[in-house]
Amino acid sequence: QIYLQHATAAKTAATIRNERSIYEKWLRPALGSTPVSSLRPSHLEQLILHVITQGKSAQTARHVIALVSQVWNMAQVHDVVSGENPCRRVKKPQQDSRRMRFLTPDEAVQLLHALRARSKDTYDTAILSLFAGLRAGEIHALTWVDVNFEAGTLYIRDPKNKHSRHAYISPEIAEVLESRKAERNKSDLIFPATTGALRLAVSDTF
């Protein structure tokens, strides 16, 4: 409460919203009952590990620790704590700066050959991913209503961001769709789970 009162006077509304969000999501559940004076590097290392294992980026973990550090510094100004800020003794996770690498055409061909030998279903989804740039969730959500063979397009729903767009039906994709159309079951989904419901994950075959 003390930190937020002082921060509100010195920071933008957007920054305050962000810090409040970090506190509610990460700090309060993990450290809410821990006195600031009792904070140790081990507490912060566990917090970093928790953030990373929840699938968040190294940058998010650094933002979380940065807020702890700011709260600790203010506590020091108010003579609540003394000594070295425990955040300084914690190794901050580094952002992976490696370039995102894409498959070469030869690698894509090798992948498709391997998948075709294992599972036609997984092969078909890989075709749509490679030739239309679709993510798994978008492929799994495709229905036959979304296919416009005359225009040569697919209507893509983004289940995460609730946006939509169109993708072109390449000859490779057309071949997949035609084969699946011939095998079409009662589901409106083009790539249903074995139960006929929406798939929630990529096959282990991949």
Image (tube, helix red, strand yellow):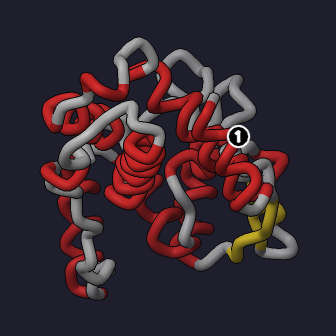
Q: Nearer the viewer, residue 184 or 173?
A: 173
Q: Nearer the viewer, residue 14 or 194?
A: 14
Q: Is residue 189 above or below residue 169?
A: above
Q: Is 62 left, or right, of 24 in this rendering?
A: left
Circle 1 residues within 10 Å: few <14, some 14–19, many ≥20: few
Residue found at x 70% / y 61%? 11
Q: Is 197 left, or right, of 14 in this rendering?
A: left
Q: Is residue 175 above or below residue 50?
A: below
Q: Nearer the viewer, residue 66 or 105?
A: 66
Q: Which residue is mark 1?
A: 5
Q: Which type of secondary structure does the marked residue at label 1 adopt?
A: helix
Identify the image quadrant of the N terminus: top right
Residue found at x 37% / y 49%? 69
Q: Position of residue 72 (x, y in %)?
A: 38, 42
Residue 54, quarter of the rendered image: top left
Amino acid carrying label 1: it is Gln
Q: Is 59 left, or right, of 129 in this rendering?
A: left
Which residue is at the far bottom? Answer: 105
Asked whether the viewer can see residue 203, the reply is: yes
Q: Position of residue 164 (x, y in %)?
A: 81, 59
Which residue is at the far top? Answer: 33
Q: Nearer the viewer, residue 37 or 61?
A: 37
Q: Position of residue 29 (x, y in %)?
A: 45, 19
Number of marks in the image? 1
Asked whether the viewer can see residue 121, the reply is: no
Q: Is residue 152 above or below residue 65?
A: below
Residue found at x 58% / y 28%? 24
